[in-house]
Amino acid sequence: MPWIFFAVAAAALVVAFRTGSVALLMACLLVSFGLTIAGFVRLLSQRVASRSQDETLMIDPLELERLRRQAPAAPTEDVSTLPQ
């Protein structure tokens, strides 16, 4: 979908460079700029969505509470006794 935005933006630039009307030139430049920004935002949102974690794999609150209760009971090593 973002490539369609880029293609239409390029077409608007071609029209802008070939027109003799200042109003059409400004409209085409604005459309081209807007579609280019929209294309980049769409590409970035797709990249973020592809890298985001699936919500169904997240820990539920009950499991998190169980892990928090279990954490203080776990033995901790004294840092001063570790070899350097």
Image (spheres, helix red, strand yellow):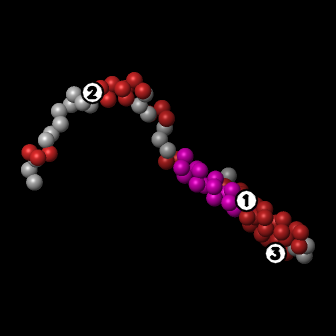
- The numbered mark, 3 or 1, whose residue comes first in the sequence reads 3
Residue for badge 2: 70
The answer to which of marks 2 and 3 sits earlier in the sequence is 3
* Tag in front: 2 or 3: 2
Residue at 81% of width from left, 75% of height from top? 17
Name the foreground residue: 54 vs 3. 54
Give the residue type that dot 1 points to: Leu
- Please, what is the dominant secondary structure of the magenta stretch? helix
Alpha carbon separation for disc pair 2 and 3? 69 Å
Which mark's residue is nearer the viewer, 1 or 2? Answer: 2
Q: Residues within 10 Å of mark 3 (few under 14, many from 20)?
A: few
Give residue 17's mark.
3
Residue type for callout 3: Phe
Q: In the drawing, does residue 44 fall left or right of residue 83?
A: right
Stretch of the chain drawn in magenta: 34-49
User: Can see residue 17?
Assistant: yes
Using the numbered discs, state the Cα–Cα distance from disc 1 to disc 2 in whole angstroms: 53 Å
Residue under the image location 43 percent in, 28 percent down: 60
